[in-house]
Amino acid sequence: MKRRLIHGALLLALGLFGAPALAGDAKDAQEAALLEARRQQIHELVMIRLNNALELSPTQSQQISQILLKYRREKTADRNQIRQLTLKLREVSNSGNEAQIQGLIQQISVAKSNLDKVDDRMFAEAKNHLNTKQQAQFIFVMEEIRREVQSVKRGLPPPGGGRVNAIQGGSGSGY
């Protein structure tokens, strides 16, 4: 029951705070502060999921939290770049300007590769603080969260019908 509540809270935070808050630039300090508060709330919900699934010690929890926060800004910048490039690609895709289209496709590919490299660095740092079983669970939980975020963005029900597969030992292959 506790797992479903945590799962629901994460989805609620992502649904309420994710897309609407990220649409458009934060035009003033109040909006920027609100966005940061929402990101912090999502981070706390992710940490609850990780703490429960990985049975982290307080020291491990603090270390993993710091690692996730360390890489969050870089990942956010990469995601924003991918989003902007994709929007531009949509605008020019029917223009017939092959060189511009190919250039944007290449830039998107590089940005996605950079995002994968950030994820790899994050995991490499996190695994130093986890045992083998926790490393596997970290991968499962982070993949499950990624799928849930994608579902929320697309307006679909969460994977597994709302069941938290990663905590229950489901499969996943990313972090």
Image: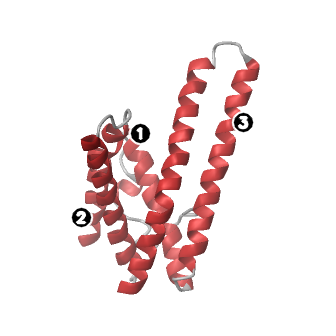
Instruction: Classify 10 Å Cα crowding around label 3: few (below 14), some (14-19), many (20 and above).
Output: few
Position of residue 2 relative to residue 134, above or below, is: above
Q: Give the distance between the C-alpha atoms of the residues marked 1 and 3, in whole angstroms.
A: 25 Å
For badge 3, the amino acid type reads Gln
Q: Earlier in the sequence, mark 1 or mark 3?
A: 3
Give the residue displayed 26% in from the left and 47% down from the top: 34
Q: As drawn, which residue projects farthest toward the front?
A: 29
Q: Position of residue 123 (x, y in %)?
A: 57, 70
Please tell me whether mark 3 or mark 2 is closer to you in this view: 3
**How many marks do you count on the picture?**
3
Query: Residue 106: which disc?
Result: 3
Q: As drawn, which residue projects farthest toward the right?
A: 99
* Residue at numbered disc 2: 5
Position of residue 9 relative to residue 23, above or below, is: below
Q: As drawn, which residue projects farthest toward the top?
A: 95
Q: Earlier in the sequence, mark 3 or mark 2?
A: 2
Q: Nearer the viewer, residue 171 or 31?
A: 31
Instruction: Classify 10 Å Cα crowding around label 2: few (below 14), some (14-19), many (20 and above).
Output: few
User: Answer yes or no: do the residues labelled 1 and 3 have beta carbons within 8 Å?
Assistant: no
For badge 1, the amino acid type reads Arg
Q: Position of residue 110 (x, y in %)?
A: 69, 44
Q: Is residue 62 left or right of residue 94?
A: left
Give the residue displayed 41% in from the left and 53% down from the top: 148
Position of residue 158 relative to residue 139, above or below, is: above
Q: Quadrant of the C terminus?
A: bottom right
Q: Quadrant of the N terminus?
A: bottom left
Q: Is residue 25 left or right of residue 174?
A: left
Query: Residue 154: which disc?
Result: 1
Q: Earlier in the sequence, mark 2 or mark 1?
A: 2
